[in-house]
């Protein structure tokens, strides 16, 4: 038997590798792995936070492949990392005293058809919630991103990695975005309106995501750049369509209830 973490030869009777300490019964990631990792993200702890952060920005795609293929003991799990960074982001957001400027606050709402906005107060609340929680929106988009990730990377990738393994990779990618967002918060606090980094932040993330893909599936920088743009562009289209359908259904449902009364 071979340890999936350090590649040492082991006796079949070993439950843990005597060289690196990893469980010898590491199995392929599946839906139970997903639920366990999410639970550990809230209630558990692991080691390798800073090592994992370093790997996410020095050899990201390679590190993601190593994790899903069984080399896990030195890495902080993807959902643990994501929840930790999300918690840090919201802590800094409130600690620095940022007030969320929403579509409703800055007048942009008037650019939207008033008849649509006034279907129900729920729509206004939904717009406010989304504007205040763009980071949370990325978290909720993980299934969409995973599906598009698998679609764009092609048949060979889908044959090699299952949906959950792909989801773990995407979760690490969103953790990278969270690091950029945290950096943006810190710079906004110190420099305020003097700098507007949002566009640069997302551009830098797309370049990093391109590097992720290059290390995961190979290919040229340009090919992977357009893959990256396609994954996020079409994911956003799916999310917008889904939100629009929800708004229309709930709006019509509430309007029907009001008519009946």
Image (spheres, grey):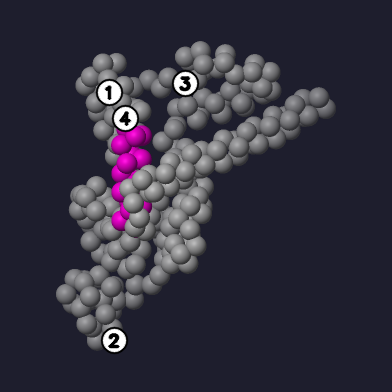
Report whether residue 153 is seen: yes
Disc assigned to residue 188:
1
Disc assigned to residue 176:
none
- Gap between marks 1 and 4 measured at Cα: 13 Å
Instruction: Give the mark nearest the N terminus, 2 or 1.
Output: 2
The residue shown at (32%, 30%) is: 200
Q: Which residues are magenta?
A: 200-216
Q: Nearer the viewer, mark 4 or mark 2?
A: 4
Q: Nearer the viewer, mark 2 or mark 1?
A: 1
Find disc 2 in the rendering and name its residue: 12
Instruction: Give the mark nearest the N terminus, 1 or 4.
Output: 1
Q: Residue furthest left?
A: 19
- Residue 45, by quadrant, is bottom left
Q: Is residue 206 magenta?
A: yes
Q: In the image, is 233 to the left or to the right of 184? A: right
Q: Is residue 25 above or below residue 156?
A: below
Q: Residue furthest right?
A: 260
Kind of element beneath mark 3 = loop
Indicate the quadrant containing the N terminus: top left, top right, bottom left or bottom right: bottom left
Please rate how many residues cluster around mark 4, counting C-alpha atoms within 10 Å: few if below 14, some from 14 to 19, many from 20.
few
Instruction: Give the mark nearest the N terminus, 4 or 3.
Output: 3
Residue 261: image location, x then y, percent: 81, 25
Residue 49: image location, x then y, percent: 23, 51
Tell whether label 1 touches label 2 (CB within 8 Å): no
Tell whether label 3 touches label 4 (CB within 8 Å): no
Q: In the image, is 173 to the left or to the right of 239? A: left
Q: Is residue 142 above or below residue 239?
A: below
Find disc 4 in the rendering and name its residue: 200
Instruction: Give the mark nearest the N terminus, 1 or 3.
Output: 3
Q: In the image, is 99 to the left or to the right of 117? A: left
């Amino acid at each position: 038997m071979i340890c999936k973490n350090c590649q040492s030869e082991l006796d079949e009777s070993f439950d843990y590798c005597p060289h690196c300490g990893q469980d010898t019964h590491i199995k392929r990631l599946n839906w139970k792995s997903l639920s366990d990792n999410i639970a550990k993200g809230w209630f558990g702890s692991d080691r390798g936070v800073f090592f994992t952060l370093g790997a996410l920005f020095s050899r990201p795609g390679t590190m993601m492949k190593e994790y899903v293929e069984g080399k896990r003991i030195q890495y902080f799990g993807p959902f643990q990392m994501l929840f930790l960074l999300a918690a840090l982001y919201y802590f800094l957001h409130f600690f620095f005293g940022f007030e969320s400027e929403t579509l409703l606050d800055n007048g942009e709402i008037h650019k939207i058809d008033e008849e649509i906005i006034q279907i129900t107060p729920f729509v206004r609340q939904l717009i406010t919630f989304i504007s205040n929680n763009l980071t949370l929106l990325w978290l909720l988009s993980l299934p969409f991103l995973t599906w598009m990730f698998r679609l764009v990377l092609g048949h060979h990738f889908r044959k090699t990695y299952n949906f959950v393994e792909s989801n773990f990779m995407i979760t690490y990618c969103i953790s990278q975005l969270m690091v950029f967002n945290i950096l943006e918060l810190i710079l906004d606090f110190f420099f305020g309106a003097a700098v507007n980094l949002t566009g640069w932040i997302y551009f830098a993330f797309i370049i990093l995501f391109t590097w992720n893909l290059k290390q995961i599936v190979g290919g040229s920088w340009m090919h992977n750049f357009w893959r990256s743009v396609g994954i996020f562009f079409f994911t956003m289209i799916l999310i917008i369509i889904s939100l629009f359908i929800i708004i229309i259904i709930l709006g019509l449902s509430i309007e029907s209830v009001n008519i009946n009364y």
